[in-house]
Image: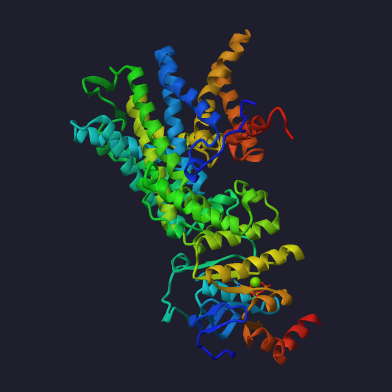
Amino acid sequence: MFYNTAGQFKTSYTKDQSLFPVKQDAILLGVVLLCAWIIFPMTASEFTFKTMLMPVLCYSLAALGLNVLTGFAGQLSLGTAAFMGVGAFACYKLITIFPEMNIIVAILLSGVFSSAVGVAFGLPSLRIKGFYLAIATLAAQFFLVWLFEKWHWLSNHNPSGAIEVPNIDMFGITVAGPNAAPVTQYYLILAIVTLITIVTINLTRGNQGRIWKATRDMDIAAELIGINLLKSKLTAFAVSSYIVGVAGALFVFLNLGAAEPNFFDIPLSFKILFIAIIGGLGSVMGNFMGAILIVALPVVIKFLPDAIGLEINPATVEHLNIMTVGALIIFFLIIEPHGLARLWQLIREKLIIWPFPH
Amino acid sequence: MSVTDLEPYTTEDGREIGGVVMEMKNITLRFGGVVAIKDISFDIRQGEIRAIIGPNGAGKSSMLNVISGFYTPSEGQVWYQGQPRPAMKPFEIARQGVARTFQNIALFEGMSTLDNIMTGRLTHMKSSMLSQGLWWGKAQQEEAKHREVVEKVIDFLEIQNIRKTPVGRLPYGLKKRVELARALAAEPQILLLDEPMAGMNVEEKEDMSRFILDVNDEFGTTIALIEHDMGVVMDLSDRVVVMDYGKKIGDGTPDEVRNNQDVIDAYLGVAN
Ligand SMILES: Nc1ncnc2c1ncn2[C@@H]1O[C@H](COP(=O)(O)OP(=O)(O)OP(=O)(O)O)[C@@H](O)[C@H]1O
Ligand SMILES: [Mg+2]
């Protein structure tokens, strides 16, 4: 009933191809955007901004990038965190070498660097597939983090090798560094994430998306219908690493304020991969659901026992969190490989025919 | 009409057959010790339906794979539109107007029927990644324009009701039809069909035969097809190549082939 599609007829192919052929989807998205743009910023505390809202957006963006590569183009990568690192360090160098550069421009440009590095590491993908490609990206992961640690020029010779974000102004407002207001940073992150998400949706629903999916589903047939596999895979690496790099730069510059090289190590790569899997491979919106779940889970696990009067120590919280995430991964890999996005779709299909299922 | 007669002619049912559009010249294909194709030559003429038949393992699919560039012949060469075809990747050959279907269905399982067929258009789509990312304007217009072509194919093959269905959920016969639709959407010069009717019931075979004839008749598409059902082959094709153990043992009109002693032996040999 809520999802009654009766009476919504498509009178042109353009309309049928529009983003929301079903009106209720558009309304739902409107509500989500309203929350993200108006309701949350008005109600959130500084702490919520810093530890929940902004990380959710940054993780979502990184998972979106990974999803372009793995979910859409079918190329598994375990090096996501390292590419986030390339974005973050590139941004750091950009703003120190060109102090006059607008921070948003610097962040968007830093993706170009991670994109180039991603393409370089994606080159073997024409020859090696699946598990072996994953190992190759793992090599990229180790190598790049090693590079972040050893190449002191990257951190401007900071003994710890860490990036420390200075105060950066934009149009007279401090947007990065210790003095920046979280709400300002939130809006900047939200704007960039929204923009990149829209572009990605457009890319994945049109011809390029079909090229990637064809490459993923059956590469031999893809090539025989005219797809240049190398180009298809490399564009996936390029776009994916661009988005991942921007996510890394955003995360460090507008949310965390500082990051050591080992922040970009394997655990972060897996975290992003888990978000993409739980959210749903081959989905755009799933990344947001996955990120919300991964960020909210430890908070829920921490506060729920509290609320019902149970004493629970922090180590146990951490263990419970890891166990729950593990269980979720297994659940989704086995029962629902298309993740939360697919679960939502099933519910939606049920709602469309509800209350008359026949 | 005889095989060597290369003058354009009109068939009994009024279709125009032109000159040679593709020619296999002394093709040999080896896989290690296995010789899948032995020194085979034959040609395909503009607008005709050319069948390739032969017992299992004769090398028919291998021949189609050579034509579509998936295998490079060990010896010999494919001539296309009067030119020897240089070494090319399969995707480049597809872009020259060669489309095909597969013996074992090769659809993109994670996509809908519509999207699968839309992939057939990609050799015609030009808009850059940037304009696709921005969508509104050029990319959107292009998408709508090609959707129109695809919708014609969908109408033609009578699969309107499964347009939005994920192909993974379709029954076998319909999958074959969607695969044909994807190939047709490319508006190919030459259409290669590897056992388009395998595993179908009589009714489905009749539908498929009708589609193949209509494609050839309405769009003048040149078709090369592999088929085991002799009745179908004899009804559909203008000329037939017969292969056995990688060799060509017959080539001619259905009637000529039917009366060829080598062909009869090969098929009786299989039956025994
Ligand atoms: N990639 C390959 N590697 C090794 N041998 C191959 C390969 N492809 C085909 N062959 C061999 O080549 C021969 C011809 O195979 P092909 O598939 O072309 O036969 P076919 O005529 O299409 O048979 P069917 O009617 O069963 O489809 C067979 O002996 C097969 O085992
Ligand atoms: Mg075969």
Residue B124 location, quadrant = bottom left
Front-most of A40 and A132?
Answer: A40
Residue B56 location, quadrant = bottom right
Q: Residue at x 45, y 39 (%)?
A: A201
Q: Is residue A112 visible?
A: yes
The vertical placement of A347 against A183, above or below, is: below
The vertical placement of A102 against B23, above or below, is: above
Figure quadrant of the N terminus of chain B: bottom right
Q: Position of residue A261 (x, y in %)?
A: 36, 34
Front-most of B226 and B17?
Answer: B17
The vertical placement of B224 against A123, above or below, is: below
- Quadrant in which ligand 1 is drawn: bottom right
Front-most of A151 and B24?
Answer: B24
Front-most of A194 and A145?
Answer: A194
Q: Is residue A52 visible?
A: no
Q: Residue at x 36, y 46 (%)?
A: B131
In the displayed orientation, state which residue is furthest to the top.
A309
Q: Is residue A303 left or right of residue A60?
A: right
Q: Position of residue A32 (x, y in %)?
A: 49, 24
In the displayed orientation, state which residue is furthest to the right.
B272
Q: Position of residue A136 (x, y in %)?
A: 46, 50
Figure quadrant of the C terminus of chain B: bottom right
Q: Tally the marks.
A: 0
Q: Position of residue A137 (x, y in %)?
A: 45, 47
Image color mode = rainbow
